Each structure stands twice: as structure tokens, then as C-alpha cells.
Image: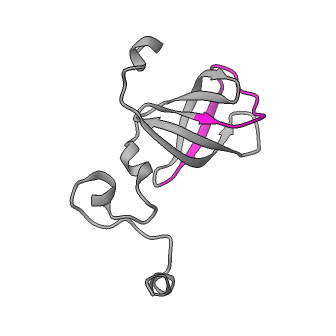
Amino acid sequence: MSSVETRNVARDSLFLFAELTFEGRPEAIRVKVRNLSAGGLMAEGAGIAVSRGDRLKINLRNVGMVKGNVAWAQDARFGVSFESDIDPKVVRAPVGATREAQTGVPGVGVASAFSPEERRLRNL
């Protein structure tokens, strides 16, 4: 798809933090994710040197590490094109939500990051 064609792709506006690592750079960088679609996202991070074509991995909530590359960069914002599509609804769902809440499909729950004791205390 050309950049003109991708402007019509549905994307969710949101505000969450994610960590990414650029290929060849050891440090993880925290960025703000401003919008998200199945094929990419727009991120913002002050003082980050980014160039079109830079390869990276970004850790998205409930999905994990996703590979991609920088599609565009302007000031502190840049676009990332994913190598493989993701389900943006899963990223938007709260951590530990049920699979049904994440995808709208009835199913089993997603494993919680809390131990049974922590979940019991958390429910008080």
C-alpha cells in the first residue's frame, strides 16, 4: 500500500506507553503510542533519533514484541509499520482481561500477571 492508501486504514486513537528497541542499539526506549491499527502505529518520544527505514521491536501490552520499521518521522513523532498484523483490540484491553473482553469472542480467560493470593487481595 502507498502512504496515500494507508491513510484510509482504520486506526484507534489512544494513549499508552510502550518500550521499543532499535536494531543495533542496546537501550530500550519508552514512547507514547498515539494511535494504533492492525498494521502499525504512531509513536511519540522526545529526543529520539529516528530515520525512515530504521528496524525495531516494540513491546505492546497483551501482545508482546512486534517487529517493524519506521515508515515516516516528523519532529518527535514517527510511524511504525509492523511486519505482521496485530489485533489492536487486544492491545487496548486491560492486562489480565478475559479473551472475550479482548476480542469479543467467548472463550477462556487470559492468564493473569498476579498470583492467586495477589488476586484475592486485589478484589477486597
**Above/below status of 34 relative to 73:** below
Q: Residue at x 33, y 64 (%)?
A: 98
Residue 62 is a magenta residue: no
Magenta-highlighted residues: 43-61
**Above/below status of 92 relative to 36:** below
Q: Residue at x 40, y 40 (%)?
A: 86
| Residue 51: x %, y % from top left | 69, 21
Q: Residue at x 50, y 75 (%)?
A: 114
- Left or right: residue 60 versus residue 84 is right
Q: Is residue 2 visible?
A: no
| Residue 102: x %, y % from top left | 34, 55
Between 34 and 30, the one nearer to me in the picture? 34
- Left or right: residue 60 versus residue 12 is right
- Left or right: residue 57 versus residue 40 is right
User: Which quadrant, please, contains the C terminus?
Assistant: bottom left
Between 40 and 42, the one nearer to me in the picture? 42
Q: Is residue 109 visible?
A: yes
| Residue 44: x %, y % from top left | 64, 36
**Above/below status of 49 relative to 15:** above
Q: Which corner quadrant of the image does residue 22 belong to?
A: top right
Q: How is the image coloured?
A: one colour
> Which residue extends farthest left?
106
| Residue 26: x %, y % from top left | 76, 42
Give the number of marks.
0
User: Which quadrant, please, contains the N terminus?
Assistant: top left
